[in-house]
Image (cartoon, rainbow, N blue to C red):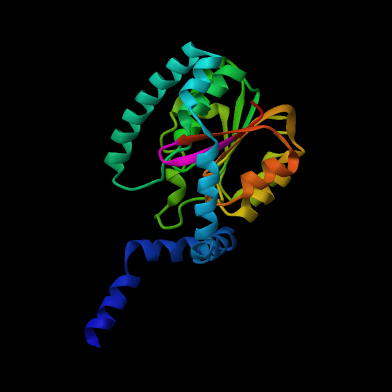
């Protein structure tokens, strides 16, 4: 009994648990954190749907290299060179940091499409370490136009988690970046009045069906007529499938690091 009690006490004194409790009482974080925890508790009930959604993706996946090379082979090569550099920088910086901040979306494809389409307004939900954010910002800088709006919420298991959002983004690119960190619901209330004509939208935040539905409904009215939509981790549930089938719109599916990305608009 004494040993069990000691183990329990040691568990609750770990840095992770302390950080979670500390962050829960900071400003407006509690409501967003509670929602995320509730979703994670219910994740096991969705595994069957995820398996079926994964099969749906596998049946439709295309080769990203062939796709990109068919449009602009030189730009695809530039994208690969950029990503090699990004991955080297990330390995060094995140290795020194000594903590896991999450990976990025299909950043080679994101960089490629930004360079190809030259959007004026880019919106992303989900930043984490900033793989995708860095790809967006470098590509926009190369284009000589465009601004990035980003929505995120800090990793509440970390101490002072705000400082790690977009950790990989270079300082000289941040002047062209508007970052909001109170969760998608509050962030979009601030972003959408400024970003009323979004040319490129990348969704990589709340992976739940309801989370995706909420954000797409909020953002849709602010998309430009020829906007590109990219959604990460579409193998988690059937939202992407249901969305494109209900809208009767063409789409593409690509694989990156064992996960699937859905694209609309190209």
Residue 166 lies, in percent from the top left, at 46, 38
The residue lying at 22 percent from left, 82 percent from top is 3
Quadrant placement of the N terminus: bottom left
Which residue shows up at 44% across the image and 32% down it? 169
Judged from this view, the residue extending furthest toward the front is: 59
Look at the image and say whether residue 106 sits in the magenta stretch: no
**Residue at the image position 51 percent from the left and 62 percent from the top:** 43
Looking at this view, name the residue that lies furthest to the left: 3
Question: What x and y, as percent, mark residue 113?
Answer: 56, 23
Q: Residue at x 46, y 27 (%)?
A: 108
For residue 114, above or below residue 250: above
Residue 257: in magenta span: yes
Quadrant of the frame with the C terminus:
top right
Q: Residue furthest top?
A: 74
Horizontal and vertical percent position of residue 164? 42, 44
For the stretch drawn in magenta, what is the main secondary structure?
A: strand
Q: Does 146 appear above or below 90?
A: above
Magenta residues span 256-262
Residue sitting nearer the eye, 65 or 60: 60
Residue 238 in the image: above or below residue 45: above
Q: Nearer the viewer, residue 123 or 97?
A: 123
- The answer to whether any part of residue 138 appears in the image is yes
| Residue 25 appearing in the image | no
Q: Nearer the viewer, residue 202 or 242?
A: 242
Q: Residue furthest bottom?
A: 1
Q: How many marks?
A: 0
Q: Indicate the position of residue 242 as horizontal and vertical percent values.
A: 67, 47
In the picture provided, is 171 more to the left or to the right than 180? Answer: left
């Amino acid at each position: 009994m004494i040993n069990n009690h000691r183990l329990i006490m040691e568990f609750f004194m770990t840095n992770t648990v302390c950080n979670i409790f500390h962050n829960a009482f900071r400003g407006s974080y509690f409501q967003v954190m509670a929602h995320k925890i509730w979703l994670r508790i219910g994740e096991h009930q969705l595994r069957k749907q995820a398996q079926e959604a994964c099969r749906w993706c596998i049946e439709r996946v295309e080769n990203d290299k062939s796709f990109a090379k068919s449009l602009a082979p030189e730009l695809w090569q530039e994208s690969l060179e950029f990503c090699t550099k990004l991955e080297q920088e990330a390995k060094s910086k995140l290795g020194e940091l000594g903590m896991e901040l999450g990976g990025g979306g299909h950043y080679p494809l994101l960089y490629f499409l930004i360079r190809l389409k030259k959007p004026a307004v880019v919106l992303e939900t989900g930043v984490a370490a900033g793989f995708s954010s860095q790809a967006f910002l470098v590509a926009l800088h190369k284009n000589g136009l465009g601004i990035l709006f980003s929505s995120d919420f800090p990793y509440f298991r970390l101490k002072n988690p705000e400082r790690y959002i977009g950790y990989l983004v270079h300082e000289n690119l941040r002047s062209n970046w508007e970052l909001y960190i109170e969760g998608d619901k509050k962030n979009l209330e601030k972003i959408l009045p400024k970003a009323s004509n979004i040319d490129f939208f990348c969704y990589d935040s709340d992976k739940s069906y309801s989370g995706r539905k909420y954000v797409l409904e909020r953002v849709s009215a602010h998309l430009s007529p020829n906007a590109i939509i990219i959604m990460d981790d579409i193998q988690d549930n059937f939202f992407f499938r249901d969305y494109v089938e209900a809208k009767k719109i063409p789409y593409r599916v690509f694989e990156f690091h064992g996960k699937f990305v859905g694209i609309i608009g190209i």
